[in-house]
Image: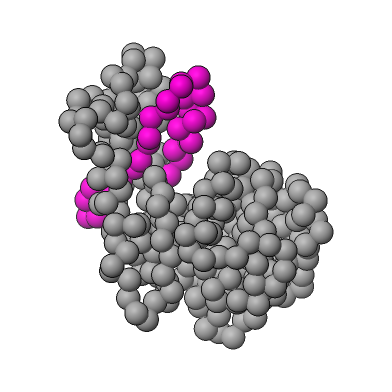
């Protein structure tokens, strides 16, 4: 990749980034798009970087400009001998959330001896656990296990990189788990990450089943239900829309972890799930909160 386009953006805009292949559907070689937070003291000041093999066209710059309301593309010609995508990802420091340690390959040697470690080589910080929602979900899973919760049938809806399903299986190793995503590419990435992290795929106890699914609309999900743990780290709108389907797919007393929502959206999400007979167990803090609900 010898060209880089950078746009200033908000955190929400970085979180809402589409897949590069979707944005550049007609490109023979779509750019690699990553997002980062250059200054942790300015949590809403993010950057979007798009790496191109060739000089981007005017039309490609127009497409990128749509990703950030107030962003103006800054185009740079980079040295061809440098792997700029790898360098961009090397800045994604590992995170510690509860007993979990999530790192890119660059930080493999930093794994603590007392942690459950996962290697996730993802283009976006959100997928590697850098984002508050992912880290919050990991911490919520850790607290559930520490409180004595036992789960045997787990679903991770909108799995992305597979990370949250891997974490749940590490805490409840005898459970059966299914991880789904509407994006087939994400499911392929989850499969690759499972191999990297030694997660066994299959239908039995201690094994993870992967599937492409739109919400709960898949025969494998129907066959596996009811779940005693359901994780959904997606967005507020889909979480609200899926509340009735989630409620029908979980057992009484099941734990439901909901994330991908801003604190300002939490009341609406909570209301949707309370209307389906669930109660709030935890309501996370911060701009991006993580809700833990319980089916009653």
Magenta segment: 15-42
Q: In which quarter of the image is the N terminus?
A: top left
Could you tell me which residue is drawn at 30 percent across and 35 percent down? 49
Could you tell me which residue is drawn at 52 percent across and 48 percent down? 189
Q: In this view, does 82 lie above or below 238?
A: above
Q: In which quarter of the image is the C terminus?
A: bottom right
**Residue 4 visible, this angle:** yes
Magenta segment: does it hold 143?
no
Residue 10: x and y in percent read: 34, 41
Could you tell whether 105 is left or right of 184 in the image?
Answer: left
> What secondary structure is the magenta-colored segment mainly?
loop
Residue 215: x and y in percent read: 68, 48
Could you tell me which residue is drawn at 22 percent across and 50 percent down? 39
Residue 48: x and y in percent read: 32, 37
Q: Is residue 279 above or below residue 134?
A: below
Residue 44: x and y in percent read: 31, 47
Along the line of sight, the residue nearer the viewer: 274 or 10: 10
């Amino acid at each position: 990749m010898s060209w880089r386009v950078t746009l200033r953006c908000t955190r929400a805009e970085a979180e809402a980034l589409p897949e590069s292949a979707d944005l550049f559907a007609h490109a023979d070689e779509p750019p690699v798009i990553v997002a980062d937070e250059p200054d942790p003291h300015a949590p809403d000041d993010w950057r979007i970087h798009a790496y191109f093999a060739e000089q981007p066209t005017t039309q490609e710059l127009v497409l990128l400009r749509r990703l950030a309301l107030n962003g103006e593309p800054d185009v740079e010609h980079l040295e061809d001998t440098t792997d700029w995508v790898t360098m961009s990802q090397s800045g994604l420091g590992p995170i510690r959330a509860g007993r979990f340690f999530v790192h890119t390959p660059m930080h493999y040697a930093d794994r603590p001896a007392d942690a459950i470690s996962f290697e996730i080589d993802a283009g976006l910080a959100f997928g590697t656990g850098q984002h508050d929602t992912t880290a919050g979900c990991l911490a919520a899973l850790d607290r559930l296990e520490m409180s004595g919760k036992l789960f045997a049938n787990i679903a991770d809806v909108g799995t992305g990189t597979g990370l949250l399903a891997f974490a749940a299986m590490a805490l409840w190793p005898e459970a059966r788990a299914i991880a789904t995503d509407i994006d087939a590419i994400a499911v392929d990435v989850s499969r690759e990450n499972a191999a990297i992290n030694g997660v066994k795929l299959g239908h039995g106890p201690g094994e993870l089943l992967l599937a492409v699914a739109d919400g709960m609309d898949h025969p494998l999900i129907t066959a596996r239900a009811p779940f005693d743990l359901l994780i959904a780290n997606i967005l507020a709108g889909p979480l609200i829309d899926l509340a009735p389907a989630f409620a029908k797919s979980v057992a009484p007393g099941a734990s439901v972890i909901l994330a991908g929502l801003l604190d300002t959206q939490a009341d609406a999400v909570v209301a949707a799930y309370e209307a389906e007979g669930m109660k709030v167990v935890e309501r996370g803090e911060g701009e991006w909160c993580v809700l833990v609900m319980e089916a009653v």
